[in-house]
Image (tube, rainbow, N blue to C red):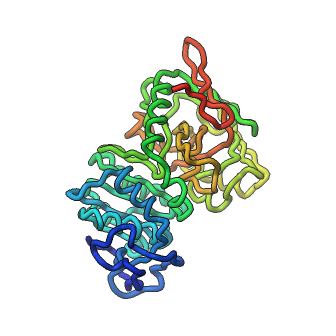
Amino acid sequence: MKTTAERKPVEPGPGAGAAKTPACDAVTEPTGQVSLRDAPEAIFDLRRVPFPPEFAYGARNAVATCLHIHAGEKVTLITDDACLQIAASIATELEALGCEWNAFVLEALASRPLAVMPGAVLEDMESSNVSIFAVEVQPNETHSRMQMTDIVNRRRMRHAHMVNITGEIMTQGMRADFNEIDRLSQVVLERLRAASYIRATTPAGTDIHAQLSPAHRWFKTSGILSPGRWGNLPGGECFTAPGEVNGVFVVDGVAGDFLCKRYGILRGNPLTIDIEGNRIARVRCANKDLERDFLAYTQTDANSNRVGEIAIGTNIGVEHVIGNILQDEKLPGVHLAFGDPYGAQTGAPWKSSTHLDVVGLNFSIWLGDANGEEQIMRDGQFTLDN
């Protein structure tokens, strides 16, 4: 193991220093935020970072259940100052497993926000089986993340995308039964693959019709990541690039990327998006700062205002939004994303430099084809028989 960070190590917490310390004994007490900026000299070692013991279950879920990492494999672990303790909990599991792993702390390698992913990270990924990205993102870093996922797709790596992961998520969504979520996701996936359109409504005013394209693939990210697959952790969604979406989408949950942290849960000030021919036609919100930031983000390039993703959340362990898109988009319901369609997975032939998710609440969902409609969700609850 090596950790790339030219900083002085913090003092280890109880039980955190030994190379093969069992995961459950890594730390005996919760600790405060650890900052690289407090340690400007030597090599920073994640094994010496104390972390709350309640992170251990979620970290073990990520390493053993979701990624199925084996002792003979190599892992690239990417983190930053904000997520240091979470990365430390994951590093403890990797160390206990006995696999080869290298960790990189972004602030030690480049200025934030990142214009490009540091070369040392990309080089290490070229020889890894698995990568884990546990980072609090900053505005205008989408390109750097795409550089990373391009390697994941080309090398068919298993990749855990833990963007904006927090301690709250580590003790909630990351403690879910991902095997049960995988079973439900497979049932939903089979229904979606047979459908030609999705119709969805909410009490807040969402009313959309999404025509599906047979040329675009559905993709399941249940949290169980097999070779050649990558997805967000915590997992729990089925997504594709739609053929064409029309209607109104009311964002009374959260908006993604830096908008999520800046504006939080939008139930009190929802963002209403009129969609025509798969493009944003109009946006309305009482919070004019949010409206302005959303419009600026979705005008970054020619396809930033195009619906690149329609997804159905399947993480039945998530019961409400918490103001963090990583977990909130897994809430049972529909979410859309404007911008890049993840063409390597979905088969959509176009690209964008941006990808912005939006989440609504309390969905009713119908899947349709030439033979009629089937309702699969009512007021946020699945109605599937099997």
Q: Is residue 348 above or below residue 191?
A: below
- Name the residue rendered at 31%, 51% in the picture: 68
Q: Is 308 on the left-hand or right-hand side of 280?
A: left
Quarter placement of the N terminus = bottom left
Q: In this view, which residue lies farthest toward the top?
A: 371
Q: In this view, which residue lies farthest toward the right?
A: 286
Q: In this view, which residue lies farthest toward the bottom?
A: 41
Find residue 323 and report its horizontal and vertical position in percent: 63, 56
Find residue 114 and report its horizontal and vertical position in percent: 45, 65
- Name the residue rendered at 46%, 57% in the picture: 162
Tell which of 147 and 334 is nearer to you: 334
Q: Is 383 on the left-hand or right-hand side of 53?
A: right
Q: Is residue 19 above or below residue 242?
A: below
The part of the image, by quadrant, that contains residue 116 is bottom left
- Name the residue rendered at 32%, 74% in the picture: 4
Tell which of 100 and 95 is nearer to you: 95
Residue 2 appearing in the image: yes
Residue 353 appearing in the image: no
Find residue 255 and report its horizontal and vertical position in percent: 62, 51
Tell which of 178 and 281 is nearer to you: 178
Find residue 259 and report its horizontal and vertical position in percent: 62, 57
Q: Is 381 on the left-hand or right-hand side of 231?
A: right
